[in-house]
Image: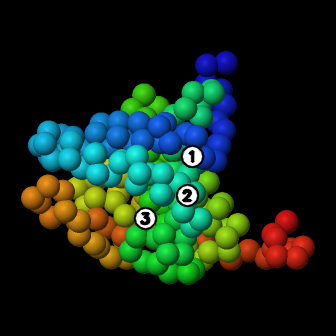
Amino acid sequence: MENEKKIRFEKCHLEKLDDIIEIGKDTYFDTFSKYCSEEVMKDYLEKAFDVDKIREEIMNKDSSFFFIYLNEELSGYLKLNINEAQCDLRDENGLEIERIYVKEGYKGKGLGSRLINLGIEKAKEYEKEFVWLGVWEKNKAGIEFYNKNGFYEIGMHSFRMGDEIQNDYIMKKDIKKENRIYNGNFPI
């Protein structure tokens, strides 16, 4: 059936470094290139998705990347951070959803929500109390999407894009504490 979607996740490892970089650059460009000059975008993409920088992120014990596949086609990825890998809050009770990147041809198929849900499930596994993320203040569709998924604004931080100072809203979603059964240190 055409409406049936087979979705699966795969933890990303170093051997998939090129895929992470390609998806990151393509998705960021598709989403934000209309808001800045070609030179500013090129400079940002080279720095943000530098091979050594992304390699270091993948190897960080407090960061995790997960690919999402739709009908066995690589469709995007999610990056999560805990502890010191978190960008702004660095709260031991929180998990940062740093990147939710869905490739252009796969948007509108529910993959973003599936990636958020994966982040929330990982936060529960790590016994975190909340998840949080940053979203550009002019990204109205992103803000609406996060609001629809239970996130609310708790603050703001600034970042530089070329010569321009821009702002991200910091948004948070509280996670209901659940009773868990333990076998040693590992939730079952």
Decide if residue 20 is on the left or right side of residue 49: right
Cα–Cα gap, marks 2 and 3: 21 Å
Task: Name the quadrant containing residue 101.
Answer: top left
Q: Amino acid at mark 2?
A: Met
Counting from the top left corner in percent of width and height, residue 153 is at 37, 71
Task: Name the quadrant containing residue 144.
Answer: bottom left
Counting from the top left corner in percent of width and height, residue 4 is at 65, 26
Identify residue for label 3.
133
Decide if residue 34 is on the left or right side of residue 123: left
Identify residue for label 2.
59
Provide the secondary structure element on which disc 3 rests. strand
Counting from the top left corner in percent of width and height, residue 113 is at 53, 49
Provide the secondary structure element on which disc 2 rests. helix
Q: Amino acid at mark 3?
A: Leu
Kindly tell me whether residue 5 is visible in this rendering: yes
State which mark lies toward you, 1 or 3: 1
Quadrant location, the N terminus: top right
State which mark lies toward you, 2 or 3: 2
Q: Residue at 28% of width from left, 39% of height from top? A: 29
